Amino acid sequence: MLDRFKVPDDIAVRIAPDDMRATVESMFRALGMPEADAVQAADVLVYADMRGIESHGVSNMMRAYVHGFRNGHVNPTPEWKVVRDTGPALYVDSDNGLGLVVGPAVMDLAIERAKQYGIAFAVTSNGGHYGAAAYHAHRALPHDMIGISMTSGGVHVAPTFGAEPLLGLNPLGIAAPAGEEVPFLFDASMSSVAGNKIGLLRRVGGNVAPGWVATEDGAPVMEEAPVPPNFLLLPLGGTRDIGSHKGFGLMMMVEVLTTVLGGTGAGPDRRTAFAHSFIACDVAAFTDLETFKADMDTYLKRLRECRTAPGEERVVYPGMLEAEDEEDRSANGIPYHPEVIEWFTATCGELGAAHRLG
């Protein structure tokens, strides 16, 4: 994550991962979740914070989830079910359950089917936000599988040349196993900047970079500036000259493979809030597993040892920085903005939930 999104070290409050995990579990239980579901939901959020994906960790997302439960928009005790099943292809109704709970269960179901069929594709809709895409894709790695997860993010992005929010943020996560190297693990919104990162910018008083957002009339903001009061997000690439048509196309791809394939409409015409897709691919069904891992190691090492451009220290591939953040935060705690800790302590008091935040 770029430095502009991070909490400055001089004000950051470091919280031990287990203390934040226990606090979030307590909050979910207070909101009506069963114990096992509260543990699972907290695991998704703490995973994001541990790996430096603060945009989808507790500081941003718990506010939205608490609001959703309090207003009856999320079912705390969903009875999700498989509606269509051909073996390697599945459609699941989430029963309006939070994606933090239903998503991992459906990804695990896809993994089990991939052990049988070599590959499996599961789509679920009628549910809530599922956190960081990387979390679900990552679940495939211990099974020596490639994992892919996609979700229909909020409809806040204007198409290239457009001035209406008709595209979802639509993140994509992909994980591939390796041998000795840190596994490849990509997770990104298909917009120029993840929508939740705008919240982080506002918290730390940062500026948007050129090509991230447009004014409400659709004109791209092409210079550093404070976050505009009213804005549209832009597709990955920002403008047509530097590739926004590619981000536009990728957003549509994710939309087709989640909401449309889930039978719930697309973009502003969606009939349910979120749809997610999960793919598990058993490497051994396609090639020799050890050869695959050795080839991945060779490629990842070549990337890691690449000759650097002037002024640059090193090349990092997707998954490296996240693994380094996880190591640091396991030892030293997760850095949070003081305002986040204040919100948690106040909200725990309102909910009657226990917290371990000092």
Image (cartoon, grey):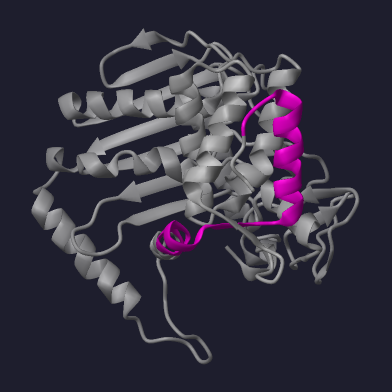
Q: Main secondary structure of the magenta part?
A: helix
Q: Residue 196: x and y, percent? A: 68, 47
Q: Residue at x 73, y 59 (%)?
A: 212
Q: Is residue 287 above or below residue 106?
A: below
Which quadrant would the N terminus be assigned to in this image?
bottom right
Q: Is residue 126 above or below residue 320?
A: above
Taking the spot 52% from the left edge, 36% from the top edge, the residue there is: 22
| Above or below for 241 versus 158 | below
Q: Which residue is pictured at 66% across the width and 29% down the height?
A: 65
Q: How many marks?
A: 0
Place of residue 232 in the rendered image (x, y in percent of width and height, measured from the top left): 80, 48
As drawn, 147 above or below 75: below
Residue 219 falls within the magenta-colored stretch: no
Q: Is residue 255 visible?
A: no
Q: Is residue 245 visible?
A: yes
Span colored in magenta: 325-354
Q: Along the horizontal axis of the image, is 146 left or right of 337?
A: left
> Would residue 156 appear left or right of 114 to someone viewing this image?
right
